[in-house]
Image (cartoon, rainbow, N blue to C red):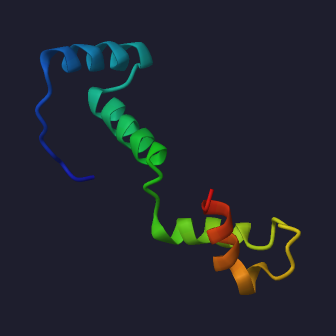
């Protein structure tokens, strides 16, 4: 692990202490958990995992349009011209 130093408001520290005590964890563990949760919620993922997720979606959906790959620009223009 990498050690870092941050500044928190008194309210933030009090809140962290309450959460840590209620979960029987250290404040550092609660902060690490919060950072992980924040990163996942913002979809800040490992590029390798993002690519794997995208590749799993390939071919799973059907548009019913047989020339979509060839004429996708035309379909997009039609969809957004409203």
On the rendered structure, is 1 left or right of 44?
left
Estimate the x, y position of residue 13 in percent, counting from the top left. 20, 19
Q: What x and y, as percent, mark residue 63?
A: 83, 67
Q: How many marks?
A: 0
Q: Is residue 44 left or right of residue 59?
A: left
- Which percent across, then down, holds residue 19? 36, 17
Q: In the figure, 20 relative to 59: above or below?
A: above
Q: Is residue 21 left or right of residue 43?
A: left
Find residue 78 and report its horizontal and vertical position in percent: 67, 67
Residue shown at 35% from the left, 41% from the top: 35
Towards the viewer: 25 or 15: 15
Q: Quadrant of residue 10?
A: top left
Seen at 40% across and 19% down, the residue is 24
- Compared to 12, does 74 lie above or below? below
Quarter of the image where the C terminus is located: bottom right
Asked which quadrant contains residue 28, the reply is: top left
| Left or right of residue 57, residue 49 in this image | left
Q: Residue furthest bottom?
A: 70
Residue at the spot 34% in from the left edge and 20% down from the top edge: 20
- Say which residue appears at 15% left-offset and 46% top-offset: 4
In front of the other: 26 or 56 = 56
Picture layout, residue 32 above or below residue 13: below
Q: Residue furthest front?
A: 82
């Amino acid at each position: 692990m990498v050690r870092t130093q941050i500044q928190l408001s008194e309210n933030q520290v009090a809140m962290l202490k309450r959460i840590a005590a209620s979960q029987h964890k250290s404040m550092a563990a609660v902060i690490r958990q919060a950072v992980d949760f924040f990163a996942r919620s913002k979809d800040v993922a490992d590029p390798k995992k993002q690519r794997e997720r995208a590749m799993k979606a390939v071919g799973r959906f059907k548009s019913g349009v047989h020339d979509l790959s060839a004429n996708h620009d035309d379909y997009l223009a039609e969809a957004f011209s409203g």
